Amino acid sequence: MVHESSGVVRLHEGRILAKIAEISRFRRRIINTNPRRKDPQFPALVLAAGKASRMGRPKQALQLPGGATMLSHAIGQARQLSAQTLVVAGAGYPLVRFRCRRVPAVWINNRRWAEGLSSSLISGLQYLPAEALGVFVLLADQPLLAREGLGTLSASARRRPDVAWAARYGNRVGVPAWIPKALWQDLRALEGDVGAGRVLNLVGANPVDIAGVQQDVDTPQDWLKVRRQLTEQAG
């Protein structure tokens, strides 16, 4: 049912979300069945399925200076690592996908996102190419990652794909990271709201300096600070 008042058209009772889902299914049939797969040995996985409860709204859909959403920006970061980029969505899907300007090789809808970060990581592993030697893992809420650091991570993984490489967080490491295929079974054993960092630190992943890794977006205060920094960079 459609209501019109003051020149504004409103779709009644969630019809807009149903329309988004219909468009999303149509796009998935086109995008996810594309036989062309670039860079299959070094795929990148963007984890973007969380509810963002501390933000109070889907942070994947927040608009950065220039109009791109934070998820669009994260896909761009992933493409600095690989031409074969996959996105794991969940909470807020399909709205998050609908507002995303960039199109990854594959969209993955993790319906078990409420079980925590590990469920998104495990869901993503199922869709990686058989030829993959490992996987780059990124989060969707680190928009200040330095291009130079991501370049170092990419070059390191391609030089030694058999070992783990991960961003340095003081005395620990975490994502963005390259996780070789030999460690995927360890990732599949994770449970709850635990990410790849646990495995990376247990195996002693090689640290990579990537400026901006500690400036993620979890709260409205984080968002205002990061947005201001991005505006200054753009200016």
Image: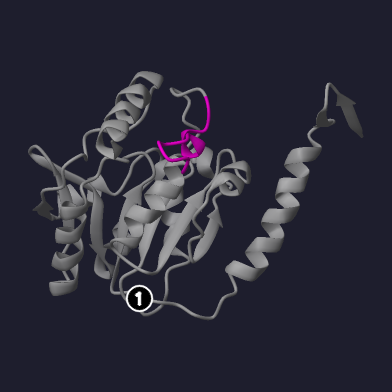
Is 126 located above or below residue 224 in the figure? below
Along the viewing direction, whichever of 219 and 62 lies nearer the viewer: 62
Along the viewing direction, whichever of 123 and 17 lies nearer the viewer: 17
Is 136 located above or below residue 39 in the figure? above
Identity, as a three-letter code, of the amino acid under mark 1: Asp
Q: Residue at x 25, y 50 (%)?
A: 176
Look at the numbered disc 1 and give the secondary structure of its residue: loop
Assign the magenta stretch its main secondary structure. loop
Task: Estimate how packed mark 1 is, as few (under 14), some (14 to 19) or many (20 or more) residues with alpha carbons within 10 Å.
Answer: some
User: Residue 56 location in percent, x, y?
Assistant: 50, 22
Magenta-drawn segment: 57-68
User: Residue 87 location in percent, x, y?
Assistant: 46, 55
Q: Residue at x 20, y 39 (%)?
A: 212
Is 43 located above or below residue 17 in the figure? below
Left or right, residue 120 beside residue 210: right
Residue furthest right in the image: 1
User: Residue 120 location in percent, x, y?
Assistant: 45, 49
Left or right, residue 10 beside residue 217: right
- Classify the position of the C terminus by image quarter: top left
Along the viewing direction, whichever of 73 and 94 lies nearer the viewer: 73
- Classify the position of the N terminus by image quarter: top right
Residue 180 among those drawn in magenta: no
Along the viewing direction, whichever of 64 and 119 lies nearer the viewer: 64
Residue on which disc 1 sits: 39
